[in-house]
């Protein structure tokens, strides 16, 4: 299993994560990005804010780690301002922090490039 590195607002975290799980995470992040883009486009065109979009909640429970990624797309004006809440824990430590959506998506894409 390879290690995924996520760059956070202050520092980074590196952990074992499979390419398959990373692809699932990427799919969730891309769905979130589309929701945010549609909200931004609607607001930019002068229309009313669209109906609330569902929150993004990704959970991975592996043998050694638990990863949860959460975002409410309804509180951000664009994908570029969106933050996601990340919780990563194992039997010894728990990390809960916020990170920029675009940065995490870039980290996921960088990780997946080595498997293409």
Image: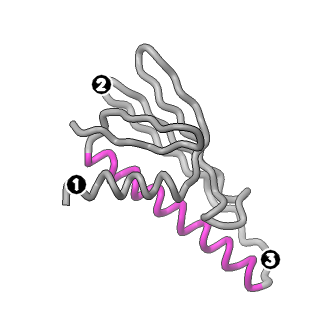
Spatial separation of the CA atoms under disc 2 and disc 1? 23 Å
Residue 15 vertical position relative to residue 83 in the rendered view, above or below: above
Residue 49, quarter of picture:
bottom right
Question: What residue sits right under mark 3 in the picture?
Answer: 48
Question: What residue sits right under mark 2 in the picture?
Answer: 63
Q: Is residue 29 magenta?
A: yes
Quarter in which the N terminus is drawn: top left
Secondary element at tag 3: loop
Residue sitting at x 59%, y 35%: 97
Residue 36, percent from left and from top: 61, 66
Residue 51, percent from left and from top: 71, 67
Mark 1: few/some/many CA within 10 Å (<14, 14-19, 20+): few
Q: Is residue 25 magenta?
A: yes
Near-viewer residue (93 or 35): 93
Question: Residue 104, labelled with which disc?
Answer: none
Q: Are marks 2 and 1 in contact (CB under 8 Å)?
A: no
Mark 2: few/some/many CA within 10 Å (<14, 14-19, 20+): few
Who comes first in sequence, dot 2 or dot 3? 3
Mark 3: few/some/many CA within 10 Å (<14, 14-19, 20+): few
Secondary element at tag 1: loop
Residue sitting at x 48%, y 18%: 93
Q: Nearer the viewer, mark 3 or mark 1?
A: 1
Residue 61, quarter of picture:
top left
Question: What residue sits right under mark 1 in the picture?
Answer: 114
Magenta residues span 19-45
Who comes first in sequence, dot 3 or dot 1? 3
Q: Nearer the viewer, mark 2 or mark 1?
A: 1
């Amino acid at each position: 299993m390879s290690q995924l590195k996520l760059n956070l607002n202050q520092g980074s975290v590196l952990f074992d994560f499979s390419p398959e799980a990373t692809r699932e995470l990427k799919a969730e992040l891309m769905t979130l990005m589309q929701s945010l883009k549609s909200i931004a486009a609607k607001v930019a065109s002068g229309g009313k804010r669209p109906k609330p979009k569902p929150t993004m909640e990704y959970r991975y429970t592996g043998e050694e780690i638990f990863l949860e990624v959460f975002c409410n797309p309804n509180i951000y004006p664009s994908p570029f301002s969106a933050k996601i809440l990340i919780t990563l824990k194992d039997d010894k430590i728990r990390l809960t922090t916020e990170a920029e959506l675009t940065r995490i998506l870039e980290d996921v894409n960088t990780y997946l490039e080595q498997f293409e």
